[in-house]
Amino acid sequence: MTLVLSVIGTGYLGATHAACMSSLGFNVIGVDTDASKIALLAQGQLPFYEPGLEELLQQELASGRLTFSTDFSMLADADVHFICVGTPQKENSLAADLSYVEGSLAALAPHLKPGSLVVGKSTVPVGTAQKLTDILASSAPQADLAWNPEFLREGFAIEDTLRPNRLVVGVTNDRAEEILREVYAPVLELGTPWIRADLPTAELVKVAANSFLATKISFINAMAEICEAAGGDVTVLAKAIGYDPRIGNRFLQAGIGFGGGCLPKDIRAFMARAEELGAKQALEFLREIDAINLRARTRVIDLVRSLLAQDLSSYTIAVLGAAFKPESDDVRDSPALDIAAQLHAAGAKVTVHDPKAMHAAKKRFPALGFAQSVEECLAGADLVLHLTEWREYRELDTAHLKTLVKTPIVIDGRNALDRDTWIKGGWDFHALGRKSL
Ligand code: UGA
């Protein structure tokens, strides 16, 4: 008989996982304590933007396999329960807030049927899975626990769930592994590597991967600083080192750095956990990774000041991009929006445009100006900042744009625009880690 699955927490990860597992043919019930989120999902609407996901959600709801509820007792029939709730950074420390993970296990425990498997997917500090196993042993000894970290990227959530580059399962016995192999059988048939690990290793794989990615980005941003000091070009440098397969050319895009709901908080929580474990020194370098990342934002603001004036109060600045990356409406810890807000706080008149993240950006920083189109955003600007590399910004008619602004100065904060095109269009072009021509 086909397994019945549940997904607890229907945010980015959970909504994607629920729709994707349903598309593999399983009956899936998604549960969340947020009634408005559940009501939206049940009507086939997503509370966030992710390419293709709303269509998949509607398709799976129509199939009858996918349902949503706020009632945990509806989970009693499920064989496998995926915990997908958030683990945000705590208010007053670097550590992760585990209250949603612990709360969902407590709500689930009374409904677990004998032989069922609870599978954690949330990103947690190492040691959490063992702690939850101990809790389960007293609250629901009839069930077992496994850890199955998630590596999906926003903007590629469906692809990364159905065709991941690896599946990692932390288990304490063969039966748990067999159940997870059954769940992921269609994904394994594609030749996806399967890695069985113990619980702490599975938890660590996730934060190690995100720390490595963050390190790669900060490394190239450190090289950008050196290029600026020495008169080099970081885009050429990145291309050249990237040909070495040991280095690889991905995640070497220098610019205003990483943001979002994962990389920044994950490296901080990892440092906090290392300290608790008495291994603080091992991750001291992540503090520098974080510092380089935040410095990239300051460097852009310094560049704006050097091009306009120290006192920005009489200047109008157009900001293209608010999301933390393209193909997303997520503005959590977005470097683009942070820079826009800092310029506003420094007295500049800042107008922001983003193809998808306007609503979220406005909610976060209502005092900023918001424009419905690129043309409206650039009208009368003293300087244009390109901060999120949406495709449509690469395809702009630069000569036409020049007629809209007060002074044609552009800073490419993502090293994604074609410099020659902008210079030909009559712009004074600047970018991080590159000489201005
Ligand atoms: C990241 C990881 O890539 C996923 O594997 C992981 O599953 C996810 O976090 C998570 O923990 O849930 P995501 O936050 O969607 O995914 O975003 P990334 O594509 O990793 O980009 C992160 C940030 O780095 C963005 O702000 C992006 O603009 C920036 N970035 C990326 C650069 O500045 N330079 C680059 O070369 C690449």
Image (cartoon, grey):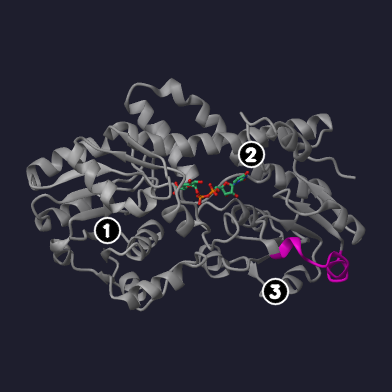
| Amino acid beneath label 2 | Arg
Mark 1–mark 3 distance (CA, rounded to whole Å)? 38 Å
Asked if one can make out residue 384 in the rendered structure from this viewpoint, the answer is yes
Q: Is residue 418 above or below residue 213?
A: below
In the rendered view, would you say 25 is above or below 159? below
User: Split into 4 quadrants, where in the image is the C terminus?
Assistant: top right
Residue picked out by circle 3: 373
Answer above or below: position of 28 versus 113: below
Q: Which residue is mark 2?
A: 295
Mark 2 / mark 3, whichever is N-terminal = 2
Asked which quadrant contains residue 279, the reply is top left
The answer for how far apart the CA atoms under marks 2 and 3 are is 30 Å
Location of residue 54 in the rendering, given as x and y in whole percent from the top left corner: 45, 71
Q: Under tag 3, what secondary structure?
A: loop
Q: Quadrant of residue 388?
A: bottom right
Give the side of residue 329 with respect to residue 351, left or right: left
Quadrant (top left/top right/bottom left/bottom right) for the N terminus:
bottom left
Ranked by sequence position, the earlier of labels 2 and 1 is 1
Q: Nearer the viewer, residue 405 or 26?
A: 26
Q: Pick whichever, 23 or 76, lies toward us.
A: 23
Write the residue at 81% across / 48% down. Answer: 430
Q: Is residue 30 left or right of residue 264?
A: left
- The magenta-colored residue range is 392-406
Q: Is the distance from the Cβ of mark 3 to the nearest ligand 1 atom less than 8 Å?
A: no
Of tags 2 and 1, the one toward the viewer is 1
Q: Which residue is mark 1?
A: 8
